[in-house]
Amino acid sequence: MGQGLMGALGFEGERMSKVDTAWLRMDSPSNLMMILGVWILRPGIQHAALSQRIHDRLPPYRRFVQVAREDAAGAHWVDDPHFDLARHVTCLPLQQQPGQSAQAALQERVAHLAMQPLDPMHPRWQFELVEDYDGGSALIARIHHCIADGIALISVMMSLADGGGLPPQRKPSHRQRSAAGAAEDWVVDTLIRPFGDLTARALDAAGGGAAKSIALMASPQQGFSDTLGQAMNLARTGAQLASDLAALALMPDDSPTRLKGTPGTTKRVAWCEPIPLDEVKAIGKALNCSVNDVLLSCVAGAIGTYLRDLGDDTQGQEIRAMVPINLRSMEDAWKLGNRFGLVPLVLPIGLDNPIERVFEVRSRMNELKGSMQPLLTFGLLSIAGLLVKPAQDAMLAIFGRKTTAVMTNVPGPGTKLQVCGSTLEQTMVWVPQTGTVGLGVSILSYGGGVQFGVIADTTLCPDPQRIIDAFEPEFQRLLMVTLMLPWGD
């Protein structure tokens, strides 16, 4: 019996980390644990060229040719003895209804695929290419969260760019960076940089002991008692950690807006055209706020506008969004797996004044700096991976009650990339929502612009395009009010 077949039968294989195991078991009828991405390329590319590029670039990432198998001890990875690239890289024409725009048809297709489970008998990823889309091509990527988190998978996707393809798990040399400059310099120097310095501050506050505890909790060789022991060590790292643990445990349930409730089994997606990043930076400089503060305040404004347009009273209301925070060091930039924590960001959707709202967001972000909540949520996910599935579901359901949205905010390359000789014009990525969370928000800067996208459960938010349509007006209102402020000489 060959090694591949023995592995497929569960006799041997590489043990899956506890955090990755938690994500493997987190699929539900309402929320599949897939990271969803869309690329718009012009001019168009051919299926054969894309398949060859993936064949040449993905083999160093072994998870893309391995199957995730669950067992009594958790889960493990084994090579797929029947791996066939054609199963994972498909090509279909876009079904466009009469009078329907190409973008609307693509959004409909993306939403449909968001609710189609990946085949558990083979590696859990798939790329679907629409060769003819709006003067170019569109690529829809679906990758299960158990393979890796969004940060790692974006670096994998960037390896498909022209000049990319460095072996994972090592820092590129200067000569190598010059060959693939835009993509690889960005991954190492920008993407891995912590969101708002939260990771660096948390690790500094906790010291080496906390960083070691993270590594031990992620280790597939670590036993249950040892893992709990390391989690307890985290709890002994000081007053800051105790305070953050209490804050997580005592978070009140989120505001009961129409965006909260029991999700169904249908989703819709929407995204806007990019807005100039230079304008976002100019507002931030004028108001002494970060780019993130500006964008998040516009998201809060767009959601508030959406609810008010439906007749809801948002005065004094806030909603909580869980924001993934990278916990990778630069030397681990190319590794797969899940290495991130979460912080709860409260968005003041009830504040209509754009200046007041951006300052309130800035204040909330400043409060999170130095927080150890990313470490704590990583530890909770590690422990969840040790529990039986019903216990894991019950533990993670707590976050569903306390959260309205999952939000990603990713800084991309400032220069547009080339893929198979074509220009990557636009890119969007959504991480999955969990439990009863029905709203996913994505903010991604790329090529001098910023794109805002929403994926929503149709039971809770039937028309996410209305949130998208409110985003740019909120940004323009903030820009106009900023320009009207009285500035000194």
Image: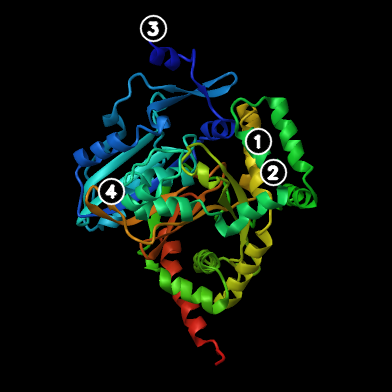
Q: Position of residue 56 (x, y in %)?
A: 28, 36
Q: Can you tell which mark lies on residue 1?
A: 3
**Structural crowding at the residue carrying mark 2, measured as other residues with C-alpha within 10 Å and reported as few (<14), some (14–19) or many (≥20):** few
Q: Nearer the viewer, residue 78 or 208?
A: 208
Mark toward the start of the polypeptide (2 vs 4): 4
State which mark lies toward you, 3 or 2.
2
Q: Secondary structure at mark 1?
A: helix
The Cα atoms of the two marked residues, 3 and 2, are separated by 46 Å
- In this rendering, the answer to whether 423 lies above or below 356 is above
Residue under circle 4?
A: 162
Q: Quadrant of residue 5?
A: top left
In the picture, measured across the screen, residue 142 lies left or right of residue 197, that is left
State which mark lies toward you, 2 or 1.
2
Mark toward the start of the polypeptide (4 vs 1): 4
State which mark lies toward you, 4 or 3.
4
In the picture, measured across the screen, residue 397 lies left or right of residue 443, that is right
Mark toward the start of the polypeptide (3 vs 2): 3
Mark toward the start of the polypeptide (1 vs 3): 3
State which mark lies toward you, 1 or 3.
3
In the picture, measured across the screen, residue 137 lies left or right of residue 187, that is left
- In the rendered image, the quadrant that contains the N terminus is top left
The Cα atoms of the two marked residues, 4 and 3, are separated by 40 Å
Query: Is mark 4 in CB contact (under 8 Å) with mark 1?
Result: no
Q: Secondary structure at mark 3?
A: loop
